[in-house]
Amino acid sequence: VRRSEISLLQIVRICCLWSELLRVIASPGTLLFQSHLYPYLQTFQHVRRSEISLLQIVRICCLWSELLRVIASPGTLLFQSHLYPYLQTFQDVRRSEISLLQIVRICCLWSEWLRVIASPGSPSSHMSSSVLTSQGIFTTSRIGSSEFPNSGASSSFTQPMEDMNENEETDLLSISWNQDYGCFAAGTSHGFRIYNCEPCKETFRRDLKSGGFKIVEMLFRCNILALVGAVANSHYPPNKVLIWDDHQSRCIGEFTFRSDVRGVKLRRDRIVVVLEHKIYVYNFTDLKLLHQIETLANPRGLCCLSHYSNTFVLACPGLHKGQVRVEHFGLNVTKLINAHDSQIACFTLTLDGLLLATASVKGTLIRIFNTMDGSRLQEVRRGVDRAEINSIALSPNVQWLAASSDKGTVHVFSLRVRVFGEDSVTQPNAVQGPALFHQNSSSSLDPLISPNTGANPNSSLSFMRGVLPKYFSSEWSFAQFHLPEYTPFIVAFGSQNSVIIVGMDGSFYKCSFDQVHGGEMVQQEYVRFLKFENRPR
């Protein structure tokens, strides 16, 4: 074939096309786009221009594959004599005027290409081989620490702030918590920023000229983030997920889909990508596709995960209106919970995944469920008029629930739900099952309320709950904090009895509430973490 004047680039394209066709045929529902092959084609073409013969390239690739196989074979002893053939062959190649840099480039490219081709069920994904270790992706560095080399940033992604137009307005596109609620990420029209919560302080930022990101998902406080570009981003479209390593200041993996990405969630061992009608679950170490879940239309990208290492629970919309699907992957259990009559607007899980709190598009009631059997444990009322619930948060000790809405009030409710042996909340290994204490809303609150905790107020007509409509026996919020209306806010619990509130208007609040008497919360801190000038309302 080579003698027939077909270029190396054409041969590579033929091989890539054949591999792609085989994978599409063998893996229904998976996609591989041609754009993922461009780096390989361009690099091989560049090597070809440097007068390295096809035979030499093939020898290097075959040699490298064999060497990797010998080194990676478990249970085999690798003596120095085993390396002699490879070393001698590399030495022969070296004598043929091929530079060491070219050899390294060919070997790295071949390894990366082999991994992409040999990863069934991982469609449209690409990961650099240099970030994989025997334990998986290297995630030990902390985001924003001084050890990150700014000078090593890729010019195609990270632009120094001095290169940006100082007069150009920055818009806030998204805000999201990290997994322990100690930080939050802000996607802007020029990049993204990471903030610490206590105290509120910008940890670092990445700005670029090509556009911003509508989704920025952190992985605790390590160097790995998941990014999804905004519509105006010229380089990173909204149908692509980038796995960004801030330690190396470069993209180490990516996923491309036919439709826009609605949400991304991360665990230390999983990557979850949310589309409007489907959810994909990938292994973090090699980006292999593990699970696919069909959902009802999900434009909000609703999905939440547990974050204890010994349990993996995922909650997402079901296939019917008002239904939440809960997957206990470790137990191979699926539970469908008919939470509301209307469509689901917001929900969240406890860190261990045993409790689920939900709200519908009506926004009047919030319900708490046992995810193991689907039973409803408690119901609280935000108000009587319709509202859009923007965020729900459960405290780590499962004593409090906070919710924010477009009505401009953050409500805090006292929970009567207890995980069996509350020390299990802070000790993940102690969680053995869904052993929960709970009571019906009509029963006494006293046995399960801790001495320093107040109860949610009931209607003064609650004694007539058997005669009057259900509204009159509702549990109302224990504490409140008032904010500007119509601005989306997300909420989380801070240290002690504090609530952290972050708004899409660039505002940060830290408030405290009285655990015995409740009432209006006290503002402890207020920061404008992102200022808007001349922003149209």
Image (spheres, rainbow, N blue to C red):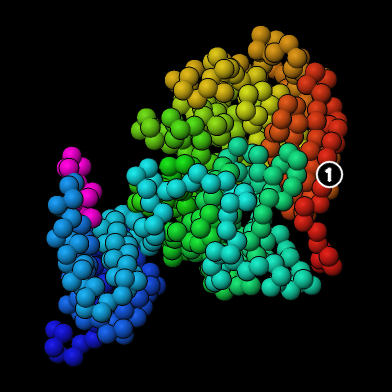
Residue at the top extreme of this rendering:
447
Residue interval drawn in magenta: 68-77
| Residue 51 percent location from the top left of the image | 27, 85
Can the viewer see residue 27 in this picture?
no
Is residue 71 inside the magenta stretch?
A: yes
Left or right: where 113 falls relative to 429 = left
Q: Residue drawn 22% across and 50% down?
A: 71
Tell me, yes or no, whether the highlighted magenta stretch contains residue 301: no
Q: Residue at x 68, y 50 (%)?
A: 203
| SS at badge 1 | strand
Q: Is residue 398 above or below residue 448?
A: below
Residue under circle 1? 526
Quarter of the figure with residue 31: bottom left
Q: Is residue 324 left or right of residue 502?
A: left
Which x, y percent locates residue 13?
27, 77
Q: Quadrant of residue 107?
A: bottom left
**Closer to the camera in the image, 495 or 416:** 495
Q: In the figure, residue 56 lies in which quadrant?
A: bottom left
Task: Identify whether 451 is placed above or below 126.
Answer: above
Residue at position x 79%, y 50% in the image:
507
Q: Residue furthest bottom?
A: 5
The residue closer to the viewer here, 317 or 85, is 85
Please indicate whether residue 169 sits to the left or right of residue 43 in the image.
right
Quadrant housing the C terminus: bottom right
Q: Is residue 335 left or right of residue 489?
A: left
- Quarter of the image with the N terminus in it: bottom left
Q: Please state which of residues 437 and 130 is positioned toward the viewer in this rendering.
A: 130
Q: Nearer the viewer, residue 467 or 193?
A: 193
In percent of width and height, residue 63 lies at 19, 64
Q: Residue 357's spot in the image, x, y percent?
A: 60, 33
Amino acid at pointer 1: Tyr
Q: Residue drawn at (76%, 18%), measured in percent from left and top? A: 454
